[in-house]
Image (spheres, helix red, strand yellow):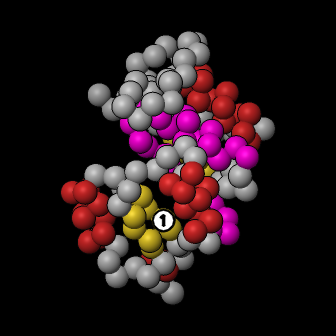
Amino acid sequence: MNPTNLYKGILIEANEERFQNLQSLYANKSDIITLNQLVSFDGNDSLSSLFEKYDCKEIDLLSIDIDGNDYHLWDSLYNSKYNTAKIVCIEFNPTIPNDVYYIQEPNIAVQHGSSLLGTYLLTYFLTHSLTHLFMYIIL
């Protein structure tokens, strides 16, 4: 059995150059969908709409890294059937002290990012649990 056929995925990249690399990397993988677009918090370009469009049944790993509005994209899944990912990897702003609750305004032009505490509380609210919290900062 080929281990690369054990998973399916939707990979979304807004940057054209990075998307071309992504598309080349997964060109021969029929179970991997690559999309070159921005994702919004609601409407046809929301994560839940895209998951619906591509018939996602369940999500094991959800990785969100959109440089600032990660909190709001994760929050946009709250009232959808797609807020049940087994593992969520989400970016936050590590320069904000851990005891500070800060949520960046939902504006794609702003790229401050939300604090770890704000992201943690949202995750707990969405999932009613947070089994593990890993934080890696590479300097």
- Image coordinates of residue 115 in percent, x first then y, are 52, 22
- Image coordinates of residue 3 in percent, x first then y, are 48, 77
Identify the residue at horizontal 45%, vertical 31% (top origin): 107
Residue ranking furthest to the left: 17
- Image coordinates of residue 122 in percent, x first then y, are 66, 31
Task: Tell me the magenta residue range.
Answer: 56-79
- Image coordinates of residue 117 in percent, x first then y, are 59, 22
Residue ranking furthest to the front: 43
Q: Is residue 74 left or right of residue 68?
A: right
- Above or below: residue 55 compared with residue 106: below
Q: Is residue 90 magenta?
A: no
Q: Which residue is mark 1?
A: 10
Figure quadrant of residue 100: top right
Other-residue count near label 1 (Cα within 10 Å), few / some / many at <14 / 14–19 / ≥20: some
Q: Nearer the viewer, residue 7 or 11?
A: 11
Identify the residue at horizontal 59%, vertical 59% (top origin): 49
Q: Tag 1: residue type? A: Ile
Secondary structure found at label 1: strand
Q: Is residue 66 magenta?
A: yes
Figure quadrant of residue 57: bottom right
Residue 62 visible (yes or no)? no
Q: Nearer the viewer, residue 117 or 33?
A: 33
- Above or below: residue 52 compared with residue 126: below
